[in-house]
Amino acid sequence: MNHQLSKDQIASYQSNGFIFIDNFLSPEELDHWRNSVNKAVKDRAGKKMPGKDVVIGEDDGINEDSDYFSKVFDQLLNLWQTDDAVKKLMLDERIGKMAAELANIDSIRVWHDQALFKRPWANPTGWHLDTPFWSFSDKNAISIWVALDDATLENGCLYFIPGSHQETKFDKIAIGKNMDSIFEIYPQLAHSKSVAAPMKAGSCSFHNGLTIHGAGANMTSGFRRAMTCAYMPDGSVFNGEPNILPEPYLSSLKIGDLLNNNNQNPIIYKA
């Protein structure tokens, strides 16, 4: 695993809100990630996440049009909680250290993982932010996105708006069908230059949860598979958003409570 970060890479991430890392996984590691994630997805049998009765394609409140959005990608969350092999991948301290170094924090927890599979001919993923949907509000939240297939301009690679994390806030904005909808909230960014992120399978990106990002349509007859994980700075507190929290835990929380349940959000790295 290519897990050592340079000072220049860290500085680039903090300035732009994202970074690409080529050849993050070796060919052998890539095979293991693919096999582990594919098995975990198959075993989940369409159930979107543990603790909630939502299946792939059902509305989960983050978008304007569930029929359209169901054809953007298949999204399965917290596979680490239902598959031991994926758990070992997601709780890898080396990845936690990378995320913490990029975010400039001392201790970091897993928020949730996501398998994101764009099917053939899938719709584009509109410009959006991540953190406003989550149950905490922290400007240093960060995600990794690992390409399990080549992510190309044709099959729906990521796009980012550099530096947007320095302008955006925690307002919850539904993910709509129109790519320019987010600029109704952030008009000062409407003329920004976007950066495409094509990457070979086994490469990865990290991005800040307040960086505006999206993905193109899949204009091919093949899949574009990715495995991702979002990370929460240790010490974050509950903001009232349910997101992926299971009901028994959710019902025990009040706004301002520390999100320090190690079974739900384990610490992945501590300096």
Image (spheres, rainbow, N blue to C red):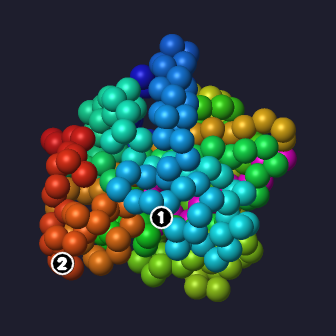
Magenta stretch contains residue 226? no
- Amino acid type, label 1: Asp
- For the question of whether residue 89 can be seen, the reply is no
Q: Quadrant of residue 147?
A: top right
In the displayed structure image, the side of residue 263 where residue 220 appears, left or right: right
For the image, the number of numbered tags is 2
Instruction: Identify the residue position indicated by label 2 in the image.
Output: 254
Badge 1 density bin: few <14, some 14–19, many ≥20, Cα 10 Å: many
In the displayed structure image, the side of residue 177 where residue 127 appears, left or right: left
Magenta stretch contains residue 210? yes
Residue at 26 percent of width and 33 percent of height: 93
Q: Position of residue 260 (x, y in %)?
A: 16, 58
Is residue 85 placed above or below 73 in the rendered structure? above
Residue at 47 percent of width and 79 percent of height: 172
Q: Quadrant of the C terminus?
A: top left
Badge 2 density bin: few <14, some 14–19, many ≥20, Cα 10 Å: few
Tell me the SS state at disc 1.
loop
Instruction: Identify the residue position indicated by label 1 in the image.
Output: 130
- Of the residues under marks 2 and 1, which one precedes in the sequence? 1
Query: What label sits on residue 93 in the rendered view?
Result: none
Residue at 49 percent of width and 20 percent of height: 32
Q: Quadrant of residue 99?
A: top left
Q: Which residues are magenta?
A: 206-219
In the displayed structure image, the side of residue 194 where residue 252 appears, left or right: left
Please state which of the two labelled residues, at mark 2 or mark 1, is closer to the viewer.
Answer: 2
Q: Position of residue 27 (x, y in %)?
A: 55, 16
- For the question of whether residue 83 can be seen, the reply is yes
Q: Quadrant of residue 153?
A: top right
- Amino acid type, label 2: Lys
